[in-house]
Amino acid sequence: MAGRIDRGDHINWNQVFYFSQIAATGSVKAASEKLGLSSSTLSEHLSQLEADLNIKLFQRQHRRLQLTSEGARLFQYAKQMFETGKRFIDVISPTSLGCYPVSIGLIPGPSITFANKIINKYISAYKDISINVLRYQHEQLEAALLEARIDFGFTDRKSDRKDIIQCQVVASELGLFVSQRLPEMALTEYLKTIPLVVCRPDRSGPSAMEELLDSFDLMPRNIVASEYPSLVEYLCREGSGVAVMGRAHFSGDETIRMLHLPKEFPSLNERLYVTWAADSENAEAVKRLQPFIF
């Protein structure tokens, strides 16, 4: 068809940006005021982009612009693309933090509880910025950091990559906990009576504590596994399970009893690392994080 382009390197990316601003503001007039361009110039750019792509990006409804289905998809990806571009620029030349949302990656697991506290401090300190919190597995998190799709993240696994920086913010000895509502019994009796409740971020196999219990022939009758530590803590407090958690989760909580483990048990620790790409060390989002982790 006439006007249609077949190669991505012929796209006028300025026009894609102009389109994204029109979509974000809801009108050509509002976008023109924001960009410092005339409405007629902006309309011409929009028309040319639609001609090049051979699609309609907007339809008018009662004097308002409404994204078409194709326009909505383009807007979604354009936002991600330009936010990533601003994040890359921030790596070499600090930009205003408010010009793009800070994106934070989280690995499911017991240490999320402590990551939440740091994120809360970040939000409280910088009320003028937007924040996206996204769920990842460990390898996905590192890829997102290196591709500048997120600014920093939290994981319970130590990285061996030289292009990834990590700072340990929590180290808490793992233990077994029950509610004070329950009568005092030996560990074996608890495990025969109520399930072991464990926060297991890795779906492929048992946690280190489960493997350790198994090696001492102390496996429970049944197991409740969850990616969410809040459920593990809740079931423990309700007397519905023996929780596998770090000591820090129940520090100072007099409603919870820590069980005695066999002396032969090796020490296991729950850890939390905050992590970012090495080349993002001077990015504004990372620099503003540092007061809460050092």
Image: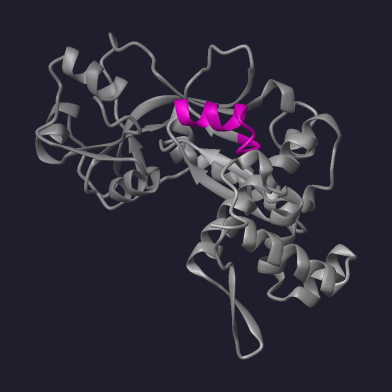
| x then y, percent, for residue 133 | 55, 48
| x then y, percent, for residue 28 | 75, 74
Q: How many marks?
A: 0
114 or 248: nearer the viewer: 114
Verify whether residue 140 appears in magenta: yes
Q: Which residues are magenta?
A: 139-152
79 or 122: nearer the viewer: 79
The structure residue drawn at horizontal position 17% and vertical position 13%, both measured from the top left corner, is 216
The structure residue drawn at horizontal position 66% and vertical position 37%, both measured from the top left corner, is 151
**Can the viewer see residue 21 in this picture?**
no
Q: Report the side of 242 relative to 68 (left or right).
A: left
- Name of the residue lying farthest toward the front: 2
| Residue 104, above or below 31 | above
| x then y, percent, for residue 244 | 32, 32
Q: Tell me the quarter of the image containing the C terminus.
A: top right
| x then y, percent, for residue 186 | 17, 29
| Residue 140, above or below 47 | above
The structure residue drawn at horizontal position 46% and vertical position 25%, both measured from the top left corner, is 139
272 or 52: nearer the viewer: 52
The structure residue drawn at horizontal position 67% and vertical position 47%, both measured from the top left corner, is 11
Q: Report the side of 2 relative to 124 (left or right).
A: left
Verify whether residue 267 appears in magenta: no
